[in-house]
Image: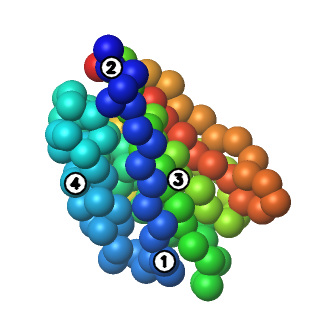
Amino acid sequence: MFGRFHRHVSKLLHHLAPAQPPLARHRASAALRPPLLHPNGDRFLDSGLVVTTEFVTNAVLHGTPVGHLIYFALDVDPTRLRIEVHDARGDCLPAFSSPGLDGETGRGLHLVDSLTKRWGCCPRRPVGKIVWGEVAA
């Protein structure tokens, strides 16, 4: 029954600057609201927005040389939301950091790890990488 609602939605984000991850968050929010992506997509909304924002922010800050694009894709079915962010730097892989108590950065992947059922990174051909995560219902 849910198969007829399954649809892949993707957005291309051009030349993102560090101030533009909110654009990805806005587009993901719009895509997850029923009935655009899936009639029950809103149940993934909160966790999906945090994971999307963290992945896109990391891609902007660490994975995208000037003049390259970031691509993000959302795929949802009744049991999970898959988030992918593609960037141009395959040599710069996601890594956990240990922020200090007063540090303002370094907690994003810890949030991703707690909000996703699983997440990872794989090469993107011909260049770059794909960072992905799955949020379970």
Indicate which disc, 3 or 1, sits on the residue closer to the N terminus.
Answer: 1
Given contact means CB atoms under 8 Å apart, are the residues at marks 4 and 3 in contact? no
| Residue 23 vertical position relative to residue 116 in the rendered view, above or below | below
Tell me which residue sits at (54%, 40%) in the image.
Answer: 132
Task: Say what amino acid the circle numbered 2 marks.
Answer: Phe
Query: For mark 1, what is the residue?
Result: 14
Secondary element type, mark 4: helix
Tell me which residue sits at (32%, 14%) in the image.
Answer: 1
- Left or right, 27 with respect to 40, comes to right
Answer with the quarter of the image where residue 69 lies. Answer: bottom right
Q: How far apart, in angstroms, are the residues tagged by discs 4 and 2?
A: 20 Å
- Looking at the rendered structure, which numbered label has been put on residue 85? 3
Tell me which residue sits at (68%, 66%) in the image.
Answer: 88
Q: Is residue 97 visible?
A: no
- Looking at the rendered structure, which numbered label has been put on residue 2? 2
- Looking at the rendered image, the disc whose residue lies closer to the viewer, 4 or 1, is 4
Secondary element type, mark 2: helix
Indicate which disc, 2 or 1, sits on the residue closer to the N terminus.
Answer: 2
- Looking at the rendered image, the disc whose residue lies closer to the viewer, 4 or 3, is 4
**Is 27 or 38 nearer to us in this picture?**
38
Task: Say what amino acid the circle numbered 1 marks.
Answer: His
Q: How far apart, in angstroms, are the residues tagged by discs 3 and 2?
A: 25 Å
Q: Is residue 5 visible?
A: yes
**Is 19 or 70 nearer to us in this picture?**
70
Secondary element type, mark 3: strand
Indicate which disc, 4 or 2, sits on the residue closer to the N terminus.
Answer: 2
Question: Which residue is most to the bottom?
Answer: 67
Q: Residues within 10 Å of mark 4 (few under 14, many from 20)?
A: some
Q: How far apart, in angstroms, are the residues tagged by discs 4 and 3?
A: 17 Å
Answer with the quarter of the image where residue 95 lies. Answer: top right
Task: Say what amino acid the circle numbered 3 marks.
Answer: Val
